[in-house]
Amino acid sequence: MVTDPSARSLPTRLAADTRLFYLLPVLALFVPLLTNPYTQFVVNLMLVYVLVAVGFNIVIGNLGQLAFANTAFFGIGAYATGLLMADAGLPFWAALIPGGAMGALAGFLASVTALRGIRLYYLAIVTLAFGELMRWIYVHADVITRGTDGLPVPMATVFGLALDSEVKKFYVFLAIATVVVKGTSNLLRSRVGRAIVAIKDNEFATASLGIPTARYIVLAFVWSGFVVGIAGGMFAVLIGRVVPDSFGLIELIFHFAMVMVGGFGSLAGSVLGAIVLTAVPEYFRSFPGLEEMFFGALLVLVLLFLPKGLASFFARYLPLFRQRFYRE
Amino acid sequence: MLSGIAQGAIYALVALSMTVVYRATTIVNFGHGDMVMAGAFVAYLLVVLQGLPFLPAAIAAVALLFVLGVAIQRGLIEPIKAGPHIGFAMMSIAVGYVLRGIARAGWGREVLPMPRVFDIPPIFVGDLILTGDAIAVIGVVAAFLIAFFVVFHWTRIGQVIQAVYQSERGAALVGINVSAFHSVMWGVGAAMAAIAGVLLAPITLLYPDLGANFLIRGFAAMTLGGFGSLGGAIAGGLLLGIAEQLLGFYVTTKLIDIAAYLVIIAVLILRPVGLFGKAAIVRV
């Protein structure tokens, strides 16, 4: 057996560093000490968008497919969770998991189009159409979804405890987000994650190594749909009313900007991008159009000067942000 | 039916301009709808606020968008040319977003009506009523298409375009400046989007998000006709416009909004190459 010390020491050293990430949720426990109800709401929104960005990044960054069905996953998760809570009277946790499962089902449908050889621009267009079609359904299936008036979501309860303040929501959301992000991190560092990145780099070469590419493409889409569906369920509870307009093209660009500014294919980047970009628009509320100009200009600048996103910028100085599941 | 053809003519123009850029540069411009919007808004600005007559305003809008298209290619696309293909799609989305933001900053959430321009009395042919709007739109688009295909097939410029479409490397070897060609084609694509926008301005209401509708319908028309096929884009646009009207008339008006999406999904799943496309298009 060949023992190459350098091959072993690199992952070991990096693994020691990444334990620092566990400090983040612990530190976050103290955030409510610094906030008022409004800023706490924004922080909760950040947690929702962390999952949105993490889920989107799996398909667009790690798998490298131009699939824009993210707002569809988000909306389906939000409506599924909201409807189960409002009409079936389920508690939050029991409604959230089917919400994620519906998102996963939508992810599966999107993956079927990708497997049929609909790729690149075709996939972008068909998934865009899927998202807009879902929005049309939210509006016109008003018997179920309450149409444009929006679906009122009742107060969430977790094991009998009512989430009647932003701080209580925060702790529940933080727990969910931590578990899902950690799960995604584990998935990406496993055989599955390496296969997904390999498919992005060269699908035919990956298949020639005996890796069942179709299965991993489906898996990536399903997991992405699940994560974003969960985020949708959290969004429904946070906002308290699910409206079709929350899942339009503007929202899609917002998701997209978070992933791109954070860095394609970088989990830490998605978290970072979501936190930064959720905070920013709050400053632009009173100026119509400024938000869009800002995001557009930001995307242009990132594309021109930092094509791998903020994560690559930090990776230059902090080993913590370096990719762990593969080497460039 | 006839208003369907008029709508379809505008879709055809949008789809054709997207195809022109796509064939020339292999980039799908996701900001194209916003260029249509920009063209319409510039025309509105010049006519309503500056008091210009419609025709000079229209020409100015088209010229301005041409310059904008060239500038986008020069300033934003060229520098990331070496990067991954996915970057182009994102850059075009970002540019469209900025345009929409500018329009919204200027006009907020208002919906702008523009005075009617095509003041042609309606013509009655039997039971048919041909409105002036429809006649003007169909007339302008038809004239433009004829001019476009004459240039494309029978002039030296057209030969250059066809040469680059066939092989960029080959074209570069015989002395065609491919990079300059890309800029010009971006300009032409943007100018054609502006023509669609200018035609649109007097016959509908203007709002900053109108581009998204045209982007999706342009895609639907391209997909239906065969992605990358010039004639297919036109046929697809006309068919889509007519289909929307017929669906709205015979089934329910609710369907007009999603006809384009249904067309895209159905075509891509059943016959991905479209009606007139060639299977040789690389879809990797």
Image (spheres, grey):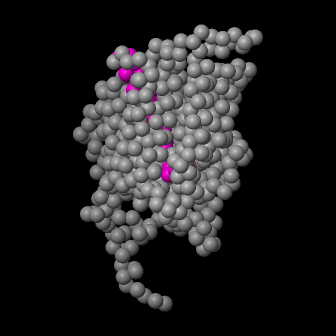
Residue A153 x/y as whole percent: 50, 28
The main secondary structure of the magenta stretch is helix
Residue B282 x/y as whole percent: 61, 57
Residue A8 x/y as whole percent: 39, 80
- In the image: residue A140, left or right of residue B161: right
Residue B103: quarter of image: top left
Which segment is the magenta one?
Answer: B23-49
Q: Is residue B179 visible?
A: yes
Most distant residue in the bottom direction: A1
Residue B129 x/y as whole percent: 68, 12
Most distant residue in the left direction: A34
Residue plotted at (35% across, 70% down): A14
The one of B227 and A91 positioned closer to us in this rendering: B227
Q: Is residue A156 visible?
A: no
The one of A113 and A223 positioned closer to us in this rendering: A113
- In the image: residue B269, left or right of residue A252: right
- In the image: residue A312, left or right of residue B283: left
Residue plotted at (33% across, 73% down): A13
Residue plotted at (66% across, 37% down): B236
Residue B231: quarter of image: top right
- The quadrant of the rendering that contains the C terminus of chain B is bottom right
